[in-house]
Image (cartoon, rainbow, N blue to C red):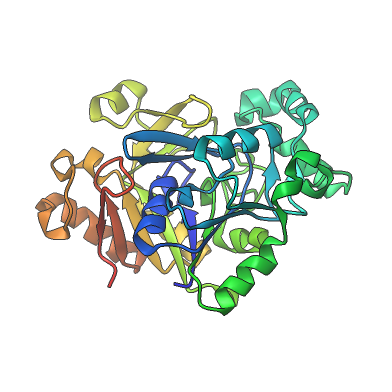
Amino acid sequence: MPCTVIVGAFWGDEGKGKIISYLALKDKLDVCVRTGSVNAAHTVWYKGNRYALHMVPAAFVYEKCRLLIGAGSNIEVKQLLEEIDQTNTKNRIGVDNQASIIEEKHAIQDKANAHLKQVVGTTGRGVGPAIEERVRRTAKLAKDILELKPYLTDVSEEVNNAMDIGKKVLLEGTQGLLLSLYHGTYPYVTGRDTSAAAICSEAGVGPTKVDEVLIVFKSFMTRVGAGPLPGEITKEEAIKRGWFETAAGTGRDRRSAPFNFELAKKAVTLNGATQAAVTKLDILFPTCKGAKTYDDLPKDAKQFIKEIEKQTSIPVVLIGTGPEALDIIDRRK
């Protein structure tokens, strides 16, 4: 460290929440900044409990970590306050003064847009209309909301000051590169950029302050909503392989496809990734479940990891072998 960016490689659902929660516990993070909007949820399994978090950073599992929501984020106030209560983080969470607000009218507009709902597959949470209003310079900001007054802060100032004195900082991206408004499968994308550069921008951290960009792959690919998915298999086949999933935030079915090395290379290039994590290796290779060391992995699983490293030219440093936050093979030095 002291500053690491976590970014998704494909269309989201890669298991970023698991990786972030592991790093929070293992590395004893000092600060974690969440970016993005309420339409993306990070799933964290910790001590047998499941958390699907739309707003609170997944690093909440480490009780000494300062949790922040960046200026580039879009906040649904009711959702945020509910998650603060759920995670018992009232005394250590901060919201940037300039984070913008998703109002009820935005969700109504989102759901009424037939093109977005039926063709693109929007979640209907109001993110797109809220971003539109922000671009028009008419949006409400966090500093305008009475319920958020106890949490207001200057996130960029906090984060940069923390890094200047050597504290460990993690910038938490949401969704995945291929949902980026600029670099994704347009028009089947979200309303913002989802790359590592955008994560830094939303948090208020300059690119030269970043030490590592950790890209998260899942051992197979999934996406919700419409849009291309190379190599897509049927729902029946996904169930048979154990790949079928539903979205943590919306409950929608996730479509499935095998891991795509060409897309992985693209994601590494566009994010400037320096390291990789691979989650759900135990789903692709069931005998990996619960493995704690790389040597415990079967030959075919090791070959898969080696192929990712060969094709992307970066090391796979974290490997998920189960759902819990600590079900990880850590290959970092």
Residue 114 is at least partly visible in this image: yes
Q: Residue lying at the far front in this picture: please name it.
A: 91
Residue in front for this viewpoint, 246 or 167: 167
On the image, the x and y values in percent for residue 157 come to 69, 68
Residue in front for this viewpoint, 63 or 188: 63
Residue in front for this viewpoint, 186 or 11: 11
Q: Is 146 situated above or below 137?
A: above
| Residue occupying the point 63% across, 38% down | 80
Residue 228 is at least partly visible in this image: no
Left/right placement of residue 251 relative to residue 115 reads left
On-image quarter of the C terminus: bottom left
Numbered label tally: 0
Q: Is 99 situated above or below 132?
A: below
Residue in front for this viewpoint, 316 or 162: 162
On the image, the x and y values in percent for residue 242 come to 26, 30
| Residue occupying the point 40% across, 62% down | 28
On the image, the x and y values in percent for residue 219 come to 31, 46
Left/right placement of residue 187 relative to residue 324 reads right
